[in-house]
Amino acid sequence: MRDGNWGVVSSDGDVIVPLEYQSIDIWSDGLIEARRDGLSALFSPDGTLLVPLRYQYLYGNDAMAGGSDDNSWFWAQNSGGRDRWIVGIGGEPLLGPGLNPLMPFDGKDRFVVEDEGFDGILSLDCEWIVLPSLKSISPAADNGLALAQTAEGKYGYIDRDGTWVIEPGRFERLGYFAPDGWAPAQSGGKWGFIDADGDWMIPPMSEAEFRPEAFNSSGVTVFEQGGKSGLINRRGEWVIQPVLEGMTEYIDGSFIGHLDGERRRYSGTGDDLGPAPFDSANFVRFDQSGTGRTVRDGQPMIVDWSGREIIGNGFDDVLEFGPNDWAPAQKGGKWGAVDMAGKWVLEPEYDCVGRCLLRPGMIPQPLSVSITEALPSTEFSPSRYSDPTSQDWCHAGG
């Protein structure tokens, strides 16, 4: 930011988006959202204008649940809830308004939409795959199955064509399928894990109120039994017996839990790594780099898991690292960015620098996405959808 205006510059100082906007968001795929006078424009990483200042809010396919890196269309919204579009390059609408597109269904050309309080699946060419008749539909998982809930509140899974693969009501509650092909399922008030055929991989044995998380890359997950937490592996064996309270996984793959009132850290293989370096009163949120920001004796600094200072001394302020290993830092009242060694990669000559995310050379601001709440359910009327192309929300063929 300079003179109250935002733009985007490279690490060489080259201007990518002119410093003439009121705010800048850089999305995780490098696309740049620039806002001015209540409207948003969208630029490619090289500064090419993709969507002009036309809509109040823009967000990308990959920012949504079930999305992908397809940048041939985007989401646009104006205030008023249902004034929501799917737009192409140039900002011309492909679907909407008049119904409420919620999220991509499969990251391709099908979308979960809400209308009259019900969810359905609609393609970009305005073909109904599933009429709006279900209480909820999630994005399809890697195995092609999507969690869906009937109007009566029963859970099951549908495939890309809307066919029930696991019938609603077979299980009491269900979760999303993970990339490993398993999903949490509840039967008899207890949680376990099932495969895509609905067969038990881990039998139901957790009385937890909330469904367990998917197994991590080490093949373990937090599992609750008898009101206590532990770790189980994909064979259903306890790696850490359920004796801990408040057990959670952190960014480096370790786990934190309370044992006899002490906050301790554990490895994914069950090793006790000793007391956690930060207690709940001095919590540090660690990011993808395995580092986090804290303040010690009034000095902002970046620390690692052990509490060792990475950078901090010599700066007025410093913020968290992004995945490209840049951190915004302030010196002499001006902001720039430093690397993991504390060396300047962007000289401190700006009024403000947002946090750096995925694309080296970019200075982004984290994107915050708000999803419109579904309207209260009403009686389903299929005749309304007999000819989608006659509706004002269908823009197939331009």
Image (cartoon, rainbow, N blue to C red):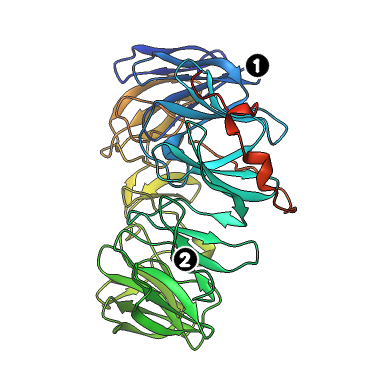
The earlier-in-sequence mark between 1 and 2 is 1
Of 387 and 33, which appears nearest the observer? 387
Check if mark 1's residue and mark 2's residue have beta carbons within 8 Å. no
Mark 1 residue element = loop
Percent x, y for residue 303?
36, 51
Percent x, y for residue 224?
45, 80
User: Which residue type carries mark 1?
Assistant: Asp
Image quadrant assignment for residue 269: bottom left
Does residue 265 show up?
A: no
Percent x, y for residue 11?
31, 21
Say whether residue 240 is left or right of residue 116. left
User: Which residue type carries mark 2?
Assistant: Gly
Image quadrant assignment for residue 159: bottom left
Does residue 40 show up?
A: yes
Mark 2 residue element = loop
Of 198 and 318, which appears nearest the observer? 198
24 vs 320: above or below: above
Could you tell me how far apart the alpha carbons at marks 1 and 2 are, in whole angstroms? 41 Å
Mark 2 neighbour class, 10 Å CA radius: few under 14, some 14 to 19, many 20 or more:
many
Q: Which residue is mark 1?
A: 37
Mark 1 neighbour class, 10 Å CA radius: few under 14, some 14 to 19, many 20 or more:
few
Of 393 and 359, which appears nearest the observer? 393
Q: Residue at x 68, y 35 (%)?
A: 82
Percent x, y for residue 352?
50, 25
Counting the numbered discs, the total is 2
In the rendered structure, find residue 362 and report the number of the disc placed on it: none
Q: Residue at x 32, y 52 (%)?
A: 290
235 vs 62: above or below: below
Nearest to viewer (mark 1 / mark 2): 2
Q: Which residue is mark 2?
A: 175
Say whether residue 285 is left or right of residue 362. right
